[in-house]
Image (cartoon, rainbow, N blue to C red):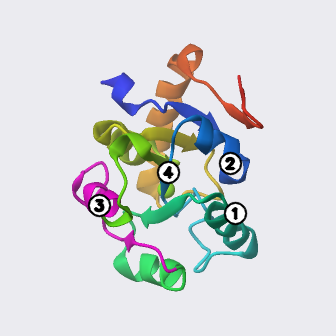
Amino acid sequence: MQNKLLPDITVKNVHILDEKFYKDRGIKAVIFDIDNTLVAHTEPTPPKDVFDYFELLNKWGIKFSVVSNNTVERVDSFCKDLGVPYYGKALKPRKKYLKKVINEMGVQKSETALVGDQLFTDMWGANRMKFLSVLVTAVGEDETSFVSFKRKFEKRILEKNEHKLKEYKGDGVVE
Ligand SMILES: [Mg+2]
């Protein structure tokens, strides 16, 4: 069970994921979680650094989309001006919207990375779909007390499996 929750790779934040990271792994599309992944859960819209990162993805020819378990309202307000596919209330690790969104992007599972901050939703969902699973260090405070509660278990799982984890440091470096 624990292996299904572990990421293929970890990274300190999304901005470290550079063109080389995607190209070396044959990744053509990225699915992002929002809360604690791209921004703290308190940020209603993408800040400039996130917009800038999305522009880089466009420049590199990497498609992207957003799939979040948060409310449809929250996800609408964050994504409506991005011009990419997005889904709220996705119930990750369920596959339904993950399947839908790769069809919309027109890519294969093996060409897709999912970037998120939680093991039980994001990493498990990504691994079930056989996407490249990328775990970021959570940005900002936990969104709910339930998330804080889950983090304790996640922390234990990550500590126990530390020897299996690899971190992407940028510029092709994995440690
Ligand atoms: Mg999250």
Tell me the kind of residue under disc 1: Leu
Q: Give the SS element for disc 1.
A: helix
How far, Cα to Cα, is label 3 from label 2? 23 Å
Residue found 31% across the figure and 68% down from its top: 89
**Disc 2: which residue:** 19
How far, Cα to Cα, is label 4 from label 1? 13 Å
Where is residue 122 drawn, in percent x and y? 41, 47
Tell me the kind of residue under disc 4: Lys
**Disc 3: which residue:** 103
Which picture quadrant has residue 159?
top right
Where is residue 92 drawn, in percent x and y? 31, 53
Residue found 38% across the figure and 63% down from its top: 105
| Residue span colored magenta | 83-103
How far, Cα to Cα, is label 3 from label 1? 23 Å
Where is residue 106 drawn, in percent x and y? 35, 60
152 is within the stretch colored magenta: no
**Sequence-wise first label, 2 or 1:** 2
**Sequence-wise first label, 3 or 2:** 2
Q: Give the SS element for disc 4.
A: loop
Residue 143 visible here: no
Instruction: Pick out the residue farthest to the right.
Output: 171
Q: Are marks 2 and 1 in contact (CB under 8 Å)?
A: yes
97 is within the stretch colored magenta: yes
**Sequence-wise first label, 4 or 2:** 2
Above or below, 136 relative to 36:
above
Residue 59 visible here: yes
**Disc 4: which residue:** 28
**Sequence-wise first label, 3 or 1:** 1
**Disc 1: which residue:** 56
Q: Are marks 3 and 2 in contact (CB under 8 Å)?
A: no
